[in-house]
Amino acid sequence: MGLPYANGPAHTGHLRTYIPGDAYTRYLKLFGYDVVFVCGSDTHGAPIEMSARQAGVSPRVLVDKYHKHYLRVFEKLRIDVDLYGSTEEQYHYEHVQEIIRTLESKGYIEARKVKLPYCPTCKTFLADRFLRGICPFCGELARGDECDQGCQRYLDADQLKEPRCVTCDSVAEMREARHHFLKLSMFNDFLLEFNEQLRGTAIARNYALGWIRQGLKDWCISRNLKWGIPYPDDEALTLYVWAENYAGYISFLQEWARQKGVDWKEYWGKDGKIINFIGADIVYHHAVFWPAMLKGADYGLPWAIVASGMVKVEGHVFSKSRGFYTLVEEDYVQNGIDLDAVRYYVLSYTGHTRDLDFTWKGFQTKVNNELVGILGNFAYRTLLFNYKNFGEIPSGSVKETTRNEISQAIEKIKEALSSFKFKEAVDRVMKLAAFGNTIFQQCEPWKSIKEDSELCKSDLYQCLQLLKAIAILVNPAMPTVAEKIWKYLGLTGDVHQAGVEDSLVPLVSGTKLPKPKHIFEKIPDEKIEKMTQILEARIQKALNQS
């Protein structure tokens, strides 16, 4: 899963990757697969140096702060990684330098003299975000390594027109420097074939293929920065952050395997399927640079790259500089927003490759109409009626119609996951709740309990069995909700350890039921007004500072 940069707090954009990645992993485990889920803090590069300078602290202090922040946020969001590492760990340094040395020994890297932008005022070469200028392709303002405001192309620093120093705004001069280049052009044919066969989402495959077909240039993988992993045997330079951060996928896996006493190659080998969850803005890194490095260093290649659509906030393109963003801790946690509801919103709002537009009003509507109105309504009315009238799971057996509905849901979820359609998976769980509501309404237990108590018990048993299946099948999307339903059904053990086959295991009649509470609470208009005001104030502050 793409590594969050340790230079700022978790925000809306992060959720588009981390929540689907976690839900997918949980579903795989539910279906019995042996899965390892790793992520970690991306702690190097120009953005870290720049953010640390602006905060008046050292880069190490900054990355330590945000590494702890992401550990905390992942726990609150129930993103259950097997190991959350850091690219600042010594084991990562050693692993990355080993990869670079292997690539050098095979002739895939060479040192070259090049002319690069230099700031005569700051007396330093300008790398990445310390440099800005005009994109030679689309004419938009761009930074030193990417046209982030325009065509999104990867750029070399010497390509920018009108280059200037970000720190002091001096016009940059071109001076000679020695750097190391990965011969990316040698991998052109391989990368074409790799991406043509790549699984995942089309947004990753098509973007990469379009870029590769234009012809690849060799790629500078060293930088004149102080903060970073020293370049092997050339410690005057550091490795470009995009030449080392995704190697964390392997170094974190190796560390997890070391702690567990297992062989990491069982997962990152010919039998293991490597799946990367990323945002659309880093496709070329993961579908071009990273597989080239893996191929050159004789490592297993990704089986699938799952790239998401872009994120919008209140109809505007996600932008921290313009204030169009929400923060996990500051907005959701501190204001008591149900984080399982946030997980549901991200997964069910739209298809994974389409743009997700987070609006507070849309969030309220989805929670109140779907989570409260369908799932919450079915769970509470079923559980409360049984608690009040029987105090236990009533006598009964699973009818064929109930069994078929659950079985069909399982198959549809499996089918949706095979093509990374997370909305379809959670929609199918919600359909089970809607089916349960229909049964409850049609059987009218408030009447049948007086006229035919055995029929009443049988109908309610179907509803409770559906709730058990929902608890298991909704667990990957909303783990806290699954725990609540499991508890109110009087079930022992851990819902997170249940397999998909347990959805059809009949409930035990006579199991005592605790008094239930509502699974969800409606979001009032006043709460949405408050959250909208917070966002509007953020946007206004950004406007005043621009």
Image (spheres, helix red, strand yellow):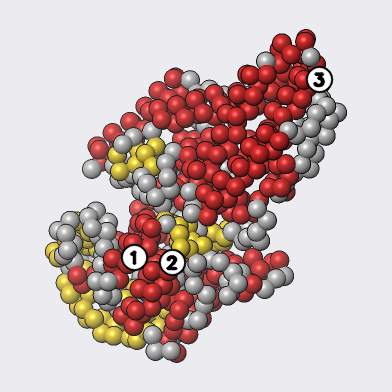
Label 2 packing within 10 angstroms: few (<14), some (14-19), many (20+):
some
- Measuring from the top left, give residue 115's x and y in whole percent: 21, 78
Kindly identify which residue carries mark 1: 208
Three-letter residue code for mark 1? Ala
Sequence order check: which comes first, mark 2 or mark 3? Answer: 2
Point out which mark residue 256 bears: none
Residue at image x 44%, y 31%? 363
Kindly identify which residue carries mark 3: 454
SS for dot 3: helix
Label 1 packing within 10 angstroms: few (<14), some (14-19), many (20+):
many
Sequence order check: which comes first, mark 1 or mark 2? Answer: 2
Residue at image x 64%, y 24%? 439
State the quadrant of the C terminus.
Answer: top left
Mark 1–mark 2 distance (CA, rounded to whole Å):
11 Å
Q: Is residue 463 left or right of residue 294?
A: right
Contact between marks 1 and 2 (CB within 8 A): the answer is yes
